Image (cartoon, grey):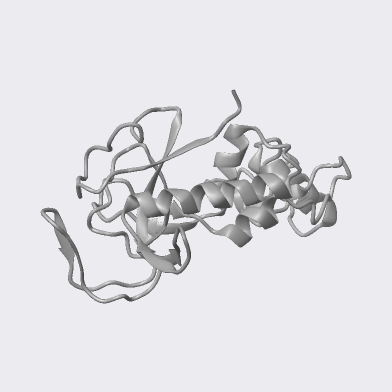
Amino acid sequence: AGITTFASSGNGGFCDRLVVPACLSSVVAVGAVYYEDIGPQSCPGCCTDTTTAPDQVTCFTDVGACLGLLAPSLVVTTALGGGVTDFGGTSGASPHASAVAALAQEAAGAALSSDELVAILKQTGVQIPDRCGQFGTLPRIDALAAVTAVFPDSDCNANGVGDRLEIARGATPDCNKNHVPDSCDLASGSSLDCNENAIPDECDPDCNHNGV
């Protein structure tokens, strides 16, 4: 209970399915992106990326409706027994996601539930276009953003919970996505509320109810 499980999405290049266990609802499925331009890359019997670039989703990443995160793969990493080795595939991406999750949980003092932790990774991730063109964008993990999100760097309503963590938990709205609770935007005067409905005017399409 309370354990967050990450799994590689699979390396078949599919656009409509993930492998087991990534397809399970209790698992966070992780696909792979390139971390830099490393030249043409081929997945034997699967596909070829004739060009590569930072944050490009790899052609072999299995994509489906339950793909939750993207993370770097095909990176040089330390090897068992010493030295370095290339670690690729979506199996190389999943450990990056779990490592960022561990950093965020440590920064939060182990106070995050599994759902909160996953929500933070998704909300702080860099949005990358889905290579299959069917699922919009997918969040690529951002370690600095995830850790920053759980530090109580500001607490505008003085409730003992950092603003970013409070927003990530869904405990307070942030309609304009500025990482400040709407109530604090209104209280500070940085946002107006012409009809006094506790919604900043920039998020209320007809704040004075004049049809415009």
In the rendered view, does 18 fall on the left or right side of 3? left
Farthest residue in the right direction?
A: 158
Q: Nearer the viewer, residue 11 or 122?
A: 11
> Horizontal and vertical percent for residue 99?
55, 51
Q: Residue at x 85, y 45 (%)?
A: 157
Q: Is residue 40 above or below residue 134?
A: below
Farthest residue in the top direction?
A: 1
Q: Nearer the viewer, residue 109 or 202?
A: 109
Q: Nearer the viewer, residue 87 or 121?
A: 87
Which quarter shows the N terminus? Answer: top right
Farthest residue in the left direction?
A: 45
Q: Where on the picture, by quarter, is residue 158? A: top right
Q: Residue at x 47, y 50 (%)?
A: 95
In the rendered view, does 29 fall on the left or right side of 4? left
> Horizontal and vertical percent for residue 124?
57, 53
Question: How many numbered circles are shown?
Answer: 0
> Horizontal and vertical percent for residue 117?
60, 40
